[in-house]
Amino acid sequence: MSYNAKCWTQQAAALAAAMIFLNGCEGVGFEAPPSICPPMVDYSRAEQLRVAEELVALPEGALIVEWLADYAVLRSQVRSCTKPRA
């Protein structure tokens, strides 16, 4: 594996981890009635750090990185769904 390929894999994993842990970010315009909003699972800081370390250690091309990016979008949608409206 070339240095550039390894560097790119680590960047992709770090990006996926960052997307998951950006808890304060606003959603993507998804709105649903609060009665159908799923609960948001909270993760401890220690769990977040462990996941970030595990992502960096994944082999190049690991499919889970793409899945976690999708999960980050879903978490963003749940945040915007459950946010109290003024």
Image: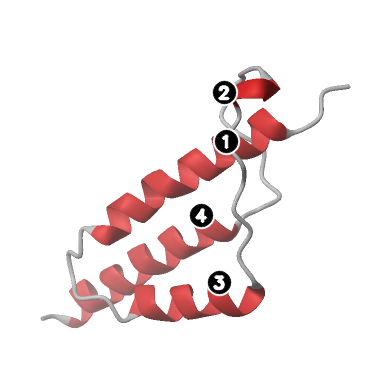
SS class of the residue under badge 4?
A: helix
Question: Can you tell which of label 3 and label 1 is closer to the viewer?
Answer: 1
Real-space Cα separation, disc 3 to disc 2, in angstroms: 25 Å
At label 4, counting other C-alpha atoms closer than 10 Å, the crowd grade (few under 14, some 14-19, many 20 or more) is some
SS class of the residue under badge 1?
A: loop
Instruction: From this view, report whether residue 57 is shown above or below residue 40.
Output: below
Question: Can you tell which of label 4 and label 3 is closer to the viewer?
Answer: 3
Mark 2 sits on what residue?
Answer: 30
Question: Can you tell which of label 1 and label 2 is closer to the viewer?
Answer: 1
Image coords of residue 60 (percent x, y): 18, 71
Labels 1 & 4 near each other (Cβ < 8 A) = no
Q: Earlier in the sequence, mark 3 or mark 1?
A: 1
Real-space Cα separation, disc 4 to disc 3, in angstroms: 11 Å
Q: Earlier in the sequence, mark 1 or mark 4?
A: 4
**Lateral position of residue 69 relative to residue 6, left or right:** right
Q: Earlier in the sequence, mark 4 or mark 3?
A: 4
Real-space Cα separation, disc 3 to disc 1, in angstroms: 21 Å
**Lateral position of residue 4 relative to residue 18, left or right:** left
Query: Residue at the location (29% across, 76% down)?
Result: 7
Real-space Cα separation, disc 2 to disc 4, in angstroms: 17 Å
Question: Can you tell which of label 2 and label 4 is closer to the viewer?
Answer: 2
Q: Which mark is residue 19?
A: 4
Report the amino acid beneath label 4.
Met
Mark 3 sits on what residue?
Answer: 48
Mark 1 sits on what residue?
Answer: 38
Report the amino acid beneath label 3.
Gln
SS class of the residue under badge 2?
A: loop
